[in-house]
Amino acid sequence: MTENGSETRSLATVRAINTTALRAAQAWSSRESTPEAWRQISQMHGVLLSFLPPGEGPATPITMIENLRKPVRDWMLRQERSRFLRNTSLIE
């Protein structure tokens, strides 16, 4: 694959992981008023793990939520870290 194609795939992966993390953060924020939020959190944990090699991701949905308090680039796949990531955290 060309270098440009690799960068395009990397950007697509970064976007997918960011979308997954945002959905998990939103569900976490509404967990007290929306019982389905826990299901959404668990689903997003599974989706996140699908992008990561075995053993690289958070072991539990709660660990994933704890990681959302850190800048995204700190918990993203090392090879997927790129200029597209900033010091953004999804939960304060």
Image: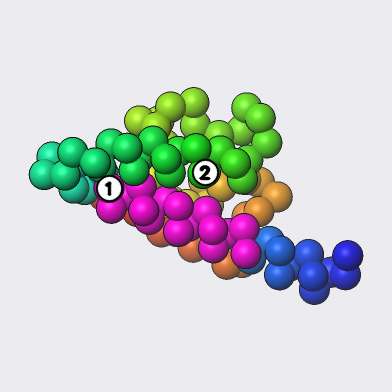
What residue is shown at x 71% (from left), y 64% (from top)?
9
Q: Is residue 19 magenta?
A: yes
Q: Secondary structure at mark 2?
A: helix
Q: Give the percent coordinates (x, y) of residue 82.
A: 64, 61
Q: Is residue 55 magenta?
A: no
The image's mark for residue 48 is: 2
Q: Residue at x 32, y 49 (%)?
A: 25
Q: Residue at x 62, y 64 (%)?
A: 12
Residue placed under numbered mark 1 in the picture:
27
Tell me where residue 7 sits by quadrant.
Answer: bottom right
Give amino acid for label 2.
Answer: Leu
Q: Which residues are magenta?
A: 12-27
Residue 85 or residue 8, whichever sits in front: 8
Q: Pointer 1 and pointer 2: residues touching (CB < 8 Å)? A: no
Q: Is residue 92 above or below residue 57?
A: below
Q: Residue furthest bottom?
A: 4
